[in-house]
Image (spheres, rainbow, N blue to C red):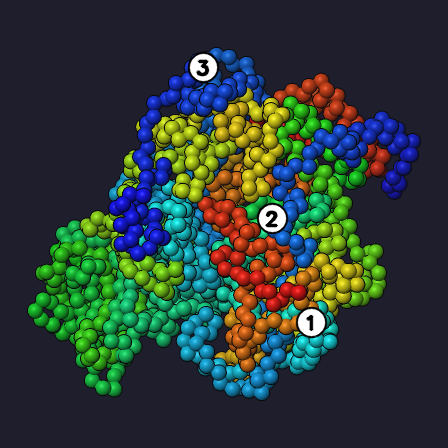
Amino acid sequence: MKNPPVFDPSRRGFLRSMVGSSLLYPGLVSELLAADSVRPGPDDPLSPRAAHFPPKAKRVIFLYMSGGVSHVDSWDPKPKLFADAGKVLSVDEFQGRKGDFKMFAKRPQWEFSRHGQCGTEVSSLFPYMAGCVDDLCVIRSMKSDHTNHYEATLGIHTGSFTFARPSLGSWVSYGLGTENRNLPSFIVIAPKTPYAGGQVWAGDFLPGAHQGTLVVPGAEPVANIQRRVATSRLQELELGAMEKMNRRHLESRADDPLLSARIKSFETAFGMQMELPDAFDLSRESDATLQLYGLERGSTKGFAWQCLVARRLAERGVRFIELIDVGSSDNWDAHGDMLTHTPLAKNVDQAVAGLLRDLKSRGMLDDTLVVWTTEFGRTPFNNSADSKGREHHHWVYSSWLAGAGVKPGTVYGASDDYGINVAKNPVHVHDFHATILHLMGLDHERLTYRHTGRDYRLTDVAGEVVNGIIA
Amino acid sequence: MKSWHIIALLLSGSLLRSFADAPKAPHWAFQPVRNPAPPTVTNATWCQTGLDPFILARLEANGLSPEPPADRRTLIRRATFDLTGLPPSAEETDAFVADLSPGAFTRLVNRLLDSPHYGEHWGRHWLDVVRYADTAGETADYPVPFAWRYRNYVIDSFNSDKPYDAFLREQIAGDILARSGPRDRYAERVTATGYLAISRRFGFDSENYHHLTIQDTIDTLGQSVLGLTLGCARCHDHKFDPISMPDYYALYGIFESTRYAFPGSEQKQKHRAMTPLLPPEESQPRWRDFESRIATLAKTLERQKQPMPAAVLRSLDDLDGDLEMQAPAAGGSKGVVVAPWIYEGQIAVSQDAQSPFKNLYPLGKVGGSVSASTNRYRIGQALYPRRLRGQGAVLHVNVDFRVATNQAPAPGRHRFWLGTQKGSHALELLLTAETISVRTADQVETIRSLQPNQWHNLQLVLDLGSNTVSGKVGLPGDVVRFPERPLAANWTGTLDYIELDSLDENGALRAGIAFDNLGAQESPIPPVSTSPLSLADVSDELNTGEPAERLRQFNTLLTEGPFGLTYAVSEGTPRNARIQLRGEPDKPGDEVPRGFLKVLGGGPLAKETSGSGRLELAEWLTRPENPLTARVMVNRIWQYHFGQGLVKTPNDFGARGQAPTHLELLDHLATQFIRSGWSIKAMHRLILSSAVYQQRGQYSVSSETDARSMVSPNGMTTRTAGSLNTDCFSPFPRRRLGAEETRDALLLMSGTLDSSPGREHPFPAPTGWGYSQHGPFSAVYEHNRRSVYLMTQRIKRHPFLALFDGADPNASTAERRTTTVPTQALFFLNDPFVHTNAVRFAARVLGGSDAEPKRIEIAYRLALGRNPTRTERAEAAEFLAAYRAEMAAAGKSEPGKAELEKSALAAFARVLFGSNEFLNVD
């Protein structure tokens, strides 16, 4: 039999007195802070920065549905598509190929009805979100440039449909910095890798601090966030010793700001080690809150966990939080059968509605922008009359915005009778981005970064702020 | 403004004329390199090399003095990291400190330059610039198993101090240079063109996005060699630099005339057109042998009803393979025929047009066809290398065709011909549904009758020694030979093109045609057959064993290929590009002759140029009088030594880039560089022996330093304090270790760095590939070799390299941006890699001595290359004691245990690893 661990208070006490505070990290840090030798430098790329004009929103929660959600089955009611199901429609392009194609109108799988005070029509695919329409501005005239997942996914995230470019979240981080230096400014929670991989949250040519930090639900959501040594005090000893070495090194090097920035990064990391796991710790959330999101106590599964953690990160000052529901397979890409939308909708519907209600009840919806989108819609037609699925459709699709600065309970833009093309007020991906930046107090034409001799921006050479969306 | 200039503007009708035509003083970088006399300086004795006066003069002009020389300990650490990316050992440091004899530093530099680690470090710099990666970057990020050969070529080239001009010529045109010998450099030169082949791929049907790949090639070529951003001119004349759209498409044509190896894509899940490391005369016979083994084994497996691998490697330069690559698949191919084919009219590629004959390409799936309604068409491709009359080559040609039955009489004919791309025919064969005939200057002679709607096989043997052609045409069991006859008398004597096209375009009805199995090679072609080769040819080793064993053999054979292959380019079909209006390939504008940038004295290719023009481009770029090539490279060398270039925008020497801080020094170095025979190592010797380089490091910063001057408009911190000092290169700027240096140093500390060169990555066998955007290729391969050998992916970055600001695998990285983020600190605190190496480090220290004071000394010497001070000794002992006590107090170990000692030392190792002293070079 093994001996039980011996707890020896006198020995421990001795250790403390012998070591004093100087060997242990927090003590050392506070000592040094008191001496004001750590300059909070302007060299920190994540220092909060002033917006171009007063922002409506302080932070963004970006909800991204991977694979292409069918607009005509969810947010965009098309009575004619119900009425004319099976009718032959002519289109001049199908899945990226030009030509004259005869297609069969396909009946939506879910019925639509009016909801809320505003009466916005939503299908029965999203019964919970339908209950929140009074807070949403549904955009029924989204447009993308590409019919393929990879390119369209890259496009909705970076504004570029071909080359790797900084992600929307990275641009926002670059433009505004962060409020809580103990946490990354841009966090992506994704259980699986989406199309186009890490490019979706990459900072690309922006300084590395602006790249998205990936959180994968599970035991260690962020790489190396878990202390690997047995006790916190052991780690504090390590940090204390390193701090001393680094201080002495710095003294003879005229307080080189880059050296001190690195010293400071260990303090931040130490804080992050405490604060980030705390953000993921849902144990003190009430039953009522868990129920609101549809989350079982103790579970880290599904979009409900992602949404509740997003709220906690938002509370802690994270600037841009993206949630990706599923990965590059088993997703909304319903070529074979529209009914595959059902479990995916179930995964997100109550969770998103819960998030909106939770934010609202805490007063956070006033300064949080919530975005719900996907890379494209799905064809209102197919090439055979009995086809069960729908193909990719980037000519028009639906998204919504809610929260800070958004006109609640409204619908913006429209598709044509069958949901094939934009009929009114197109919102291209670039316009969508320009509008999100605008709500964050950033002018998309002024938020630029000089790279290879050119000033790059999120919206390339396009994009217009959609004023009709803004309250 | 001069009056004639105003007139020119008025004539142009626009004030927005492009810079390309506007007469104005040329930008500094476009003016010739001069060899300026060194400036006069007061403190002349300070100078140790010809470059020092240029720096000193600026310092003196600003009323500054250079820093005193660095101490020897700092100097050896600086030089060793700078040249090899690794720290010096404590013993090396002590020896250097003790060696006060003259020439000690020169000997050190020579030793470092002779180390194979030099090429690994400096090769990595070049790999940054050319955005090297081990995957293709299209939607499924296909692995490129042969890319490593180019990576190692770069490393080897730096190690052998290959002259930079030759290095560039090989990378741009090595495949062409290789043909002219010597034989033992063939593989190396072909491999060099990996520089072009590693261009990024796009889309899930990447052949339809080849224009973006060419754009990526031109962007990288412009930035890496010329320091110019050419990309802007793809859509419009460059707004800032005198580079026009015609300039851009003149280059574009050169690369459109080049055949890139195909890495595989979601739509075609196999790679092809990999380049043999053997010359054609050696590779072709082995390829034939390989093909027959594959075909036979495939047949055996088919009989045994074994599942066949989805991805079959077909890599040799075969025409039909190009057709196979056009195969439309569900959901996205634009159904266009792409390079190297040149075509006009509606050419369809479909399974319906697959020939039943299996003597040449038994595994084909598609063929080409032209419908009866197409009045005018042509589809052709260059033959490479070109053959000349009288040079004795024998060329074997194969094509299968089927001319359809027509309801109405269809007198219109199809023509299959060989000759020159410019239209001189060596042989013309005419096809209708009923007959095949040969046309000469004055007559048409029928060879045999054909059966409408039946596949026929045509084989030709062109003998360029005797200047004759013979052949046979028919179907299995019914082959008619046609006797030897002279090639056309009016043919110019060059054979570089093969084409199928329409005759009688005056409205005569022509029957539709299908064609397949095009081949042209120097080895004989087997007789027409509907079964792949005879089983009699099968060697015993392949014909034995269980089906599963055969399948394994088959996979091995397919994976290994017939001989070494590499990811490279070869000559395609020479063509001039059309301008793509607004950069859109489906909006063609005027054709532009292939050629070089006018602002640098370029013009169209000479009329007599054969081939793509790449060789001419390579020679043009490396002319000593090219004002950019040498300047750009010496600036990079300077930058990697001093952290900042003389031009601070190393990839942009154009109008939007920054002017040099020391133009005369830049020109002095460029002149020396060219005079030294473009020797990069000579540049290192010059720079390292300079007084500028040997200055004391950045210890003292004046208290007036304005914090804002340390931050660029982008919020990026510059590396040194004080902008004035930075531009004066005094004192020597401190730098943080790069990602690779950090990882390598940690491995070196733990004694586990494997210093052997890396080779290929353990990618899954190509026969099992089925990557798609839904399930892209994704892997991280760990090893203990130097980090330059880590597998780097394009759409998903290597986690360590991404965290520590490694190079961008998608675009040229001219300088690493050092960032400081807490997730890096978390890595040092908690990453298993750090912990593992710390434990190994602790074991080394424990093995070194039984006494703790000695252990502390060993740890310091290993990690920092120096002995600890008295204070440091005391602090380390205090730390170890406290750590042990805390471990014991926490019940994690019992006092006095060896484990406890090791844990404490490992913790101390992490302290050293995470320290700024370990991770910075003064």
- CA gap, disc 3 and disc 1: 77 Å
Q: Chain of mark 1?
A: A
Q: Secondary structure at mark 1?
A: loop
Is residue B810 among what the camera can see?
A: yes
- CA gap, disc 1 and disc 2: 31 Å
* Front-most of residues B248 and B187: B248
**Image-quadrant location for residue B410:** bottom left
| Mark 2 Cα-neighbour bin, 10 Å: few <14, some 14–19, many ≥20 | many
For the C terminus of chain B, give its image quadrant.
top right
Q: Is residue B596 above or below residue B315?
A: above
Q: Is residue B636 left or right of residue B244?
A: right
What amino acid is found at the position of numbered circle 1 in the picture?
Gly
| Residue at 73 percent of width and 60 percent of height | A366
| Residue at 38 percent of width and 41 percent of height | B225
Q: Which residue is mark 1?
A: A409
Q: Which residue is mark 2?
A: A174
Q: Is residue B439 left or right of residue B628?
A: left
What x and y, as percent, mark residue B124? Answer: 48, 39
For the N terminus of chain B, give its image quadrant.
top left
- Pointer 1 and pointer 2 on the same chain: yes
